[in-house]
Amino acid sequence: MTTMNISLPAEMKAFVDAQVADRRYGNASEYMRDLIRRDLAREQFRAAVLAGLESGAAEEWTATHFDDLRAEIARAETAGTKSAAPGTRRPPAPATQKKKKATRA
């Protein structure tokens, strides 16, 4: 693990110390790592949302889409069961999915 020193004004240090105590972090480093992980997750979420927006117009899924998907899964499971050794099952083949795309509001 690499070390990093951070300088904080007294008010911010007091806030960090309070967060450590109130949220049961072991120390300020654990609190800072948690903040960074949350920030990274937020950035990944934003990137996923933008990718969805840029992927084009949304296609509404109907009950027929789900019925077709269930049938495809059942066929794959049946095919896997027939060719698998007794007492074992292979995972179903990947289903071809129509992706629901995000729409701009």
Image (cartoon, grey):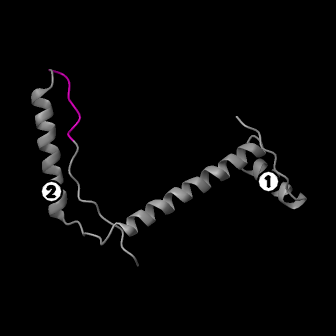
Query: Could you classify mark 1 by the number of other residues whose Cα lies within 10 Å: few (under 14), some (14-19), or many (20 or more)?
Result: some
Which label is found at residue 67? 2
Give the number of callouts.
2
Q: In this view, does 25 lie above or below 14?
A: above
Say which of 45 and 13 sits in front.
45
- At 18% from the left and 53% from the top, the residue drawn is 69
In the structure shown, which secondary structural element does the residue marked by tag 2 occupy?
helix
In-image side of 41 versus 30 (left or right): left
- Give the quadrant of the C terminus: bottom left
Q: Which amino acid does label 2 sit on?
A: Asp
- At 65% from the left and 51% from the top, the residue drawn is 36
Which label is found at residue 46? none
- At 14% from the left and 48% from the top, the residue drawn is 72
Q: From the top left corner, tell me how far across and down residue 76 is, in percent.
A: 15, 40
Say which of 91 and 51 sits in front.
51
Say which of 4 and 9 sits in front.
4
Q: Which of marks 2 and 1 is nearer the N terminus?
A: 1
What span is in magenta?
86-93
Q: From the top left corner, tell me how far across and down residue 85 is, in percent.
A: 15, 21
Q: From the top left corner, tell me how far across and down residue 20 is, in percent.
A: 76, 48
Q: Which residue lies furthest to the top in this view?
A: 86
Q: Is the magenta stretch mostly helix, strand or loop?
A: loop
Q: From the top left corner, tell me how far across and down residue 16 is, in percent.
A: 79, 53
Between the C-alphas of marks 2 and 1, the distance is 52 Å
Question: For mark 1, what is the residue?
Answer: 16
